[in-house]
């Protein structure tokens, strides 16, 4: 069973769809069926026939707005107690990280958080692999409780199964109102869809100061890339936590990962080492990111970014002046 997360735009999240694919592969090894359970305030009308699962169960209730995890926990508890799955998987998105431990506590089962690989053995025991000891080694964990429950980093496991359209079932739920009151979500800025981005520009401490961020935002805009960062930048509030790549951030696998002023610590690399091509711009030729990069540029990050911006603007016939209004669009 997989939790189907509905994003704030009312669509099923890409992370859930990716995870459903992984669940299908595990289910086929175990010769069982896979189910995605979607908990939502509104019925979804689009795309469910493309969900890679044998069954999609839509649980609907007015309280199941995207940010109100209390209701989602209650709905998922009902679904799990009803179907008694042997495995329960949840994406390690910010919402999934909120839902999973609460649900595990209610079900009184163990939870392996932030898995980067999953497998099942001949007895149907889920082998849950995740970084341990600050990423120094990978630990494979098995559960002693049922369902075997894990969260999985979005993008960490790639699977592409093709199945006939799932059986779709929907139910209206009556759930008690929770105690959390949602006051105002309008001030929350959306993070860019890093998980699905083909080209990612990632910035680290080597970019110097927060004032330089506008340069990298401009570069990302011109290249049609998404912007990501290392942890110190998220800690400093220069970028949102959702943009942080690595062990305690998100895991991505873009076609190109262009790292400006990032040293490439192990904790950072676990979040991007499945990228097809890595380009590193760093003053230090010995930095760990340079060792793994396909293209290495030993140079100042801001200098390189500014030159590429000029080149792209010349090609596009645009002004060299950084237009902050355009960036906000
Ligand atoms: C439990 C735990 C979890 C963690 N999780 C994460 C995580 O999810 N993501 C993450 O990123 N980190 C994580 N970290 C932190 C991680 O260990 C590193 O401290 C962090 O990744 C370093 O970020 P950085 O590369 O931006 O900075 P630094 O390590 O300070 O590197 C800066 C780099 O910029 C280069 N540089 C300096 N000036 C310039 C310039 N002018 N032009 C070009 N290059 C320049 C330097 O040579 C250096 O290589 C975690 C740590 C722990 C303990």
Image (tube, grey):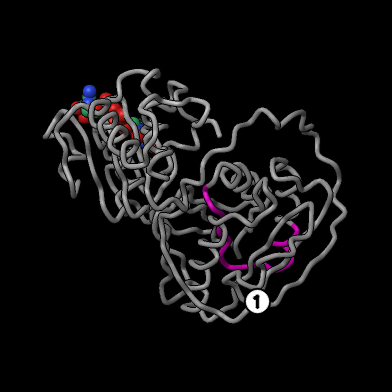
Instruction: Say which residue label 1 marks.
Output: 166
Q: Residue 39 falls in which quadrant of the image?
A: bottom right
Q: Specify the segment rendered in magenta.
A: 78-92
Task: Tally the numbered discs.
Answer: 1
* Quadrant assignment for the C terminus: top right
On whether residue 88 falls in the magenta region, the answer is: yes
Question: Is 111 rendered above or below residue 170?
Answer: above
State whether label 1 is within 8 Å of ligand 1.
Answer: no
Rendered residue at 16%/37% (across/down): 297
Residue 187 coordinates in the image, percent (x, y) = 66, 27
| Front residue (pair 253, 297) | 297
On whether residue 136 falls in the magenta region, the answer is: no
* Quadrant assignment for the N terminus: bottom right
| Front residue (pair 139, 180) | 180
Question: Is 21 rendered above or below residue 289?
Answer: below
Instruction: State whether residue 131 appears in this view.
Output: yes
């Amino acid at each position: 069973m997989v939790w189907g997360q509905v994003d704030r735009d009312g669509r099923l999240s890409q992370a859930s769809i990716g995870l459903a694919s992984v669940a299908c592969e595990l289910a086929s090894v175990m010769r069982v069926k896979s189910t995605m359970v979607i908990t939502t305030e509104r019925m979804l009308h689009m795309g469910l026939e493309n969900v890679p699962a044998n069954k999609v169960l839509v649980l609907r209730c007015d309280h199941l707005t995207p940010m109100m995890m209390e209701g989602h926990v209650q709905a998922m508890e009902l679904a799990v107690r009803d179907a008694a799955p042997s495995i329960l998987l949840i994406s390690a998105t910010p919402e999934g990280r909120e839902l999973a431990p609460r649900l595990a506590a209610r079900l009184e089962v163990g939870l392996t958080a932030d898995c980067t690989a999953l497998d099942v053995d001949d007895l149907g025991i889920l082998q849950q692999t995740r970084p341990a000891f600050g990423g120094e080694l990978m630990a494979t964990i098995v559960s002693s409780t049922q369902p075997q429950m894990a969260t999985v980093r979005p993008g960490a496991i790639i699977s592409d199964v093709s199945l006939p359209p799932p059986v779709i079932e929907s139910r209206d739920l009556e759930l008690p109102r929770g105690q959390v009151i949602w006051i105002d979500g309008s001030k929350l800025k959306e993070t860019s869809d890093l998980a699905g981005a083909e080209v990612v520009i990632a910035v680290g401490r080597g970019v110097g100061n927060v004032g330089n961020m506008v340069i990298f935002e401009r570069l990302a805009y011109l290249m049609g890339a998404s912007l990501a960062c290392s942890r110190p930048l998220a800690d400093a509030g220069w970028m949102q936590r959702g943009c942080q790549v690595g062990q305690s951030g998100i895991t991505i696998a873009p076609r190109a990962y262009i790292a400006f002023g990032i040293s490439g610590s192990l904790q950072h690399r676990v979040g991007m080492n499945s990228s097809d091509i890595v380009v590193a711009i760093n003053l230090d030729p010995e930095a760990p990111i340079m060792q793994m990069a396909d293209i290495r540029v030993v140079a100042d990050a801001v200098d390189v970014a500014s030159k590429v911006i000029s080149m792209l603007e010349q090609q596009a016939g645009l002004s060299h002046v950084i237009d902050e209004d355009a960036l906000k669009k």
